[in-house]
């Protein structure tokens, strides 16, 4: 039994396999419409979500399966003090696979170590979010035709942005990758990402506070929101939240084939005027996320 807690739980060839299955699902949806008949997915969300929870649920329905949904911690026995470990053991009695989001780093790993069914990390605190990475990789692959030879700019809250940590890890395994980390001083990329992923793979990178100075170099601009829920102090959030607001004039020096990505939800960091720009791909990311989650469910349930 395999779980997905960290993007490194999947090899490059397994990522390729998932993307190929997702592309086949897009072409032949009927072929997959009963693949998970009789199977149940439990979505255990101890933190708010729109995309991740509902795309997992849509994915399971489109595979012909069923969904048990826990949309918040308040309505579950977590509110009475039940541990993640016990919850995972209990839900394993009801469901064939679990997707869990939790505010504590490492909670998905605890769930996987205690469940008797596969567990998917749907976001653990400010740590990792591997299934958003699946959506991001698929979007880059479909748009660029390759995941190699790209300069990727990550902009915004790189400290708490778990999607940044997982995507930087995933991209560090491809050829010819360069990273540009654009953030306020207080929200710089954490050392665990630099040490475990970037240094290990000898990836060239620069850090800056100035988006304008690096815009022309980028093949991908991955914007992120400042993660209010991770701040201890509201004043710090208010001071930092509008550090980067992408507006059309800021793209004047950008490449014509730049990809503008964002895991969403967007707050204020991308002006809605950018949505009309053909380089804006964040709503395509949402759709790709559903297909990649379908492919992932099939893989973890070992459905042929
Ligand atoms: N990208 C993402 O994780 O969105 P949600 O928080 O809405 O699930």
Image (cartoon, grey):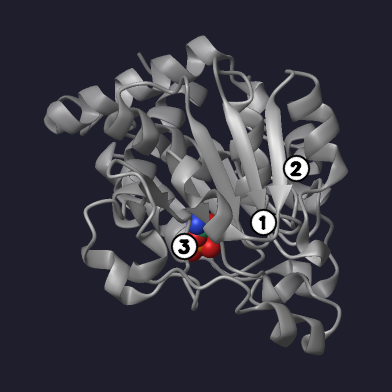
Mark 2 → mark 3, Cα distance in angstroms: 26 Å
Would you call the spot at circle 1 few (<14 residues within 10 Å), some (14-19), or many (20 or more)?
Answer: many
The location of residue 90, given as percent across then percent down, is 70, 48
Q: Nearer the viewer, residue 17 or 42?
A: 17
Front tag of 2 and 1: 1
Note whether ligand 1 is within 8 Å of mark 1. Answer: no
Query: What residue is shown at x 74% (from left), y 62% (from top)?
Result: 103
| Tag 2 secondary structure | helix
Query: What residue is shown at x 29% (from left), y 31% (from top)?
Result: 142
Q: Mark 3 points at which residue?
A: 264
The location of residue 257, given as percent across then percent down, is 29, 40
Note whether ligand 1 is within 8 Å of mark 3. Answer: yes
Corner quadrant of residue 236: bottom right
The location of residue 220, given as percent across then percent down, is 44, 42
Vertical relation: 33 (above or below) 106: above
**Residue 253 located left or right of residue 181:** left
Q: Mark 2 points at which residue?
A: 111
């Amino acid at each position: 039994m395999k779980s997905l807690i960290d993007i490194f739980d999947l090899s490059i060839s397994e990522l390729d396999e998932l993307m190929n299955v997702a592309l086949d699902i897009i072409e032949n949806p009927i072929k997959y419409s009963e693949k998970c008949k009789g199977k149940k997915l439990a979505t255990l969300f101890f933190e708010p979500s729109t995309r991740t929870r509902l795309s997992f649920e849509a994915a399971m329905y489109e595979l012909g399966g069923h969904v048990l949904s826990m949309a918040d911690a308040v309505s579950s026995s977590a509110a009475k003090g039940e541990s993640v470990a016990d919850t995972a053991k209990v839900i394993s009695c009801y469901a064939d696979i679990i997707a869990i989001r939790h505010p504590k780093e490492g909670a998905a790993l605890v769930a996987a170590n205690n469940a008797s069914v596969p567990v998917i990390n749907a976001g653990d605190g400010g740590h990792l979010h591997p299934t958003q990475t699946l959506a991001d990789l698929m979007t880059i692959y479909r748009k660029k035709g390759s995941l190699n030879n790209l300069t990727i700019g990550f902009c915004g809250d790189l400290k708490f942005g778990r999607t940044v940590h997982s995507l930087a890890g995933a991209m560090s395994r491809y050829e010819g990758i360069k990273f540009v980390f654009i953030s306020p001083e207080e929200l710089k990329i954490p050392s665990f990402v630099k040490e475990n992923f970037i240094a290990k793979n000898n990836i060239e990178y620069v850090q800056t506070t100035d988006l304008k100075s690096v815009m022309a170099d980028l093949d991908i601009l991955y914007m992120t929101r400042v993660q209010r829920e991770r701040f201890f102090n509201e004043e710090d959030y208010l001071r930092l939240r509008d550090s980067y607001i992408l507006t059309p004039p800021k793209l004047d020096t950008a490449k014509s084939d730049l990809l503008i990505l964002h895991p969403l939800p967007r707050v204020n960091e991308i002006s809605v005027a950018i949505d009309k720009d053909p380089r804006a791909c964040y709503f395509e990311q949402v759709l790709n996320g559903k297909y990649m989650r379908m492919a992932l469910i099939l893989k973890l349930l070992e459905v042929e």
